[in-house]
Image (cartoon, helix red, strand yellow):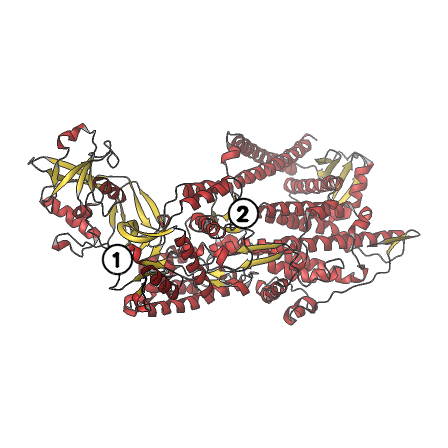
Amino acid sequence: MQWCRRATCWRLKEPTRFHRSLFSLPDSIYERVRRKPLAANYDPIAVESGWTQFWQQELSDSGKQKTSQRLFSLLLPPPNITGSLHIGHALTVTIQDALIRWHRMQGKNVSWIPGLDHAGIATQSVVERNLLKKDVKRHDLGREEFIQNTWSWKKRFGSRILDQMEQLGTRLDRQKLYFTLDEKRSHAVKMAFVQLYEKGLIFRQRRMINWCPFLNTALSDVEVELKSIEKPTRILLPGSMTSVEFGVIYRIRYEVAGHPGTYLEVDTTRPETIFGDVAVAIHPQDARYEAFHRGHVIHPFTKDRIPIVLDDTLVDMQLGTGVVKVTPSHDANDFECGQRHELPERPVLDQKGCMYGQVPSEYLGLDRFKARTQVIEDLERMNLYVGKVNHPTTIRICSRSGDLIEPLLMPQWFISVHAMAKRASSNVREGIVDIEPKHHMSTWFHFLDNAHDWCISRQLWWGHRIPAYRVQSQRISNADHDDAWIVAASVEEALAQAEKKYKQPFVEADLVQDEDVLDTWFSSALLPLSSNVGGPYPLSLMETGSDILFFWVARMMMLCEELSGTIPFKKILLHPMVRDKSGRKMSKSLGNVMDPLHVIHGATLEQLLHEVKHGNLPDREREIAEKTLRQEFPNGLPHKVDHDFPFLDPFSINIRIPGRQINIDVNRVISYRHICNKIWNAVRYALPLLKANDQCLTERIALEDVRDQMTISDRWILSRLARSVEACNLGLSTNRFASSVAAIHQFFVQDLCDVYIEFSKSILYQSHTDTSASDCDAKKRKLCALTTLLECLECSMRLLHPFAPFLTEELWQRLNLYKTSETSDLNSILSAAYPTKENAKFWIDVRAETSFEIVLDVLRGLRSLVQTFRKVTGLNTNKMGVILACKDIEMLRMLQQYKHSIESQAKVVIHLKLDTEKFADSEAILTYNATNKCQVLIPVPKSKDIMGRVAAEAERLDKRLGKCKMTIDQLTLQVKQPHYASQVPEDVQAQSSNRLAKLKIELTALRKSLDAIEFLRQN
């Protein structure tokens, strides 16, 4: 913008209007943003229409961008195909979408790779449950038909998940969409398995493994949850009609062989495994049992003599009786003891958790917990049962099904991860890999420094079948031995290996592939390499939930570095787990899982209940879910909630906050529409002004050229904008998204809407028809205010875009019609540059901020005094006379400039004076020291009634002041506590600091109001 001086008049030099082309916008959007006026009311559904498809085209075009541009690549954690997306997924999508948009607006090429996870155990479980509704079991179908049935499930729910992602407005690179069980990923998994096997890192061995009887599969150690039981507790396990008691220990007696009537008492939590006992153990230094060294006891049921072994590793003399029953086939510690003493194995529990093998006939096929009850009854009859006592303990639960883990000896496939884990741990310790928040590093080190061989085989049908083959031929004598396994990526390669190994020809029928499939996390751990074969590697960032740090992130680090020689990412960014408003983990069985589209579009209670009824929950869990829904959402979920903002709660989503979880309240999410309404209305206010003055906007808007002609309020708001830009970039660059959202919110609502727009109204709506110098100055001020408002709104849209993409794109398209700078010919806000600190710092104006804050202090003081006046007089008079007594001419001139705005906002008539006047004796005066250079005065008529009100108001203010001061003292004491800075979460510290600052401001205002009352009483 250029100004020329002609005599005493400022005017624009040859105003020419350049309207950018919108030819690339789809017709429906073009019609809406170019031809139609902005709707009076904000309608999210209308605003969101068409933008997702437009962004996809923009993304497609960006794929053809200059290769010289930097690349930002991100992998979306693939959702399981077990059902629909929930709010936890929506949080991940929201955070990653914000990151993608921010980096795109920084001029980078972006690649956001989406996918779906086949989720072996989880998917097979829900498909089996679905079949059971039709009274069909998977074995009734057979493996091939069941797998086809599961592919149909994948097609149904995979499409639903992709549709949800589409409606969430994500800028995912859909051309790179993958499924973890598709052909490319299957090939990558086979090649990785073979490569690791050839390195000696994958092996098959018979070991004590974690077995889930309900799912009938082995599990890795990290899939086992440890549940503490402090007192006797009954738990209903899956597939059972009756609950099982835990938190007790049973004491039974073994008669010592050769010593009739002498018994060794043993404590056990698992009486049902007594049939697998092959010894009892005592500590070699336990004097109580010294006489029984190298002796035997009589097994209560078989009456066999079983040895008493001396073992200082297994036995703790201080625990219980100091005697331990040894069951090598069903306890890991007992197995190690058995190895040390060369004890036999005697398995008595099968894979379904039922009794089998060398057990009495009446026990064969009996469920393990029914067998427990029966064993106790039989021991009582034999007078070998002493009783049970309370016993705090920890039980091992399957994280997938909730069933009690059964330790079983079975041959399985394992990965030796010791060296890989050590390397992954060192990567973080040495600063090669960064984890945010830092407190998660302890979890990383805990798992990796204590990593055990990873059991990767699963006894399922759905998943990557293990690429290992057994040679089944009478010509091979060791066909039943482990070394008969051939590991190869295909049958053809396996045949070639077999012929080379055994030096004789084979046909395909001689090979039988392992029936087991791989742990889902094995294929997921390869995704940085396999998700985009030939694409960017390593990834720029790994962002995901903290709950899968070891399940997924650590395993990606281990396997990808082992296979490629390069770490898959240098930065790990973790967000907290989403819980409901009560802090409970989101679970379909609790009925607190919400479809994000229901939160956005709304749903009736009937719709919510219908989904639960026709879902995959067992009857008991369905009843709980229905009860929860009726309690929490008796009227359903309201319609027309925004995509924008809802999952970026500034007070709960700061992902660097130590020890935080996100307790999400759906009603609070819904409230974010009010923020979007505020943004909508601000732009709606500005657009008619911009249109009416369109001819005044020059070919290039250069605010810096007219800085000296701006009012203090213009310079103040631009300085506040610059600080918001700085705070927002700092938040995004340090992954404190909440602080970015809070900074923009404070600027837009409190500074721009509540202050600047109100102050600019008197300038923007002022009418001048003469040609005097004052008229020209007014036009100049009006144009400065208009261009400042446009700059603030347009820049705010760019600042907000990563967090509110739909709303900001819609409004930016309209605002950008009036911009003639470098953004004017851009098709999308995504192509516009994100505001930077470097560009914004030009507008930081400390003097303007200080000066204008004085004006705001006067306005606040005036409002406070007017409120006090109305309370003590009972009058609600508009346009009352108020005196602003200024200590110097500079203050008077500054207030004169904003006199009309202050009068309009406070609804008073202001009389500016350099000094106080002498009032009539009939009048009292309310005074308020707004600043050290300005005093607000309001004359008050004298009357007994008013003086009574004055006394009551003084008492009220005094009580408020006392309460405020007490709260300040309490908060101050808290923040001064030792270790406050290191132990209290950052968000709590920030909230306390903000609250303390506001309370101190309130305290000052209360004191001034009380002083005004006291002055009135005295005069």
* Residue 634 can be seen in this image: no
Give the camera-side residue of 609 and 374.
374
Q: Is residue 345 above or below residue 978?
A: below
Crowding near the residue tagged with mark 2, few <14, some 14–19, many ≥20 C-alpha atoms within 10 Å: some
How many other residues sit within 10 Å of disc 1, few (<14), some (14-19) or many (≥20)?
few
- Measuring 28% from the left and 66% from the top, which residue is drawn there? 139
Determine the residue located farthest toward the bottom in the rendered image.
27
Residue kind at label 2, given as amino acid type: Lys
Coordinates of residue 555 in the picture (x, y in percent): 44, 50
Residue 507 in view, yes or no: yes
Give me the residue at 68% from left, 44% from top. 723
Image coords of residue 447 (percent x, y): 41, 43
Local SS, label 2: loop
* Along the viewing direction, whichever of 780 and 952 lies nearer the viewer: 780
- Residue reaching furthest to the right: 7
What's the CA distance linking mark 2 and mark 1? 47 Å
In this image, 417 relative to 967: left or right?
Answer: left
Q: Amino acid at mark 1?
A: Asn
Q: Earlier in the sequence, mark 2 or mark 1?
A: 1
Residue 177 falls left or right of residue 218: right
Given the current orientation, which residue lies at the most extreme front position? 503
567 or 630, nearer to the observer: 567
Q: Which residue matches tag 1?
A: 478
SS of the residue at dot 1? loop
Q: Position of residue 566 (x, y in %)?
A: 52, 50
Q: Which residue is mark 2?
A: 570
Task: Name above or below for residue 140 compared with residue 927.
Answer: below
Quarter holding the C terminus is top right
Count of numbered tags = 2
Q: Quadrant of the N terminus?
A: bottom right
**In the picture, residue 644 is in which quadrant?**
bottom right
Is 798 situated above or below 49?
Answer: above
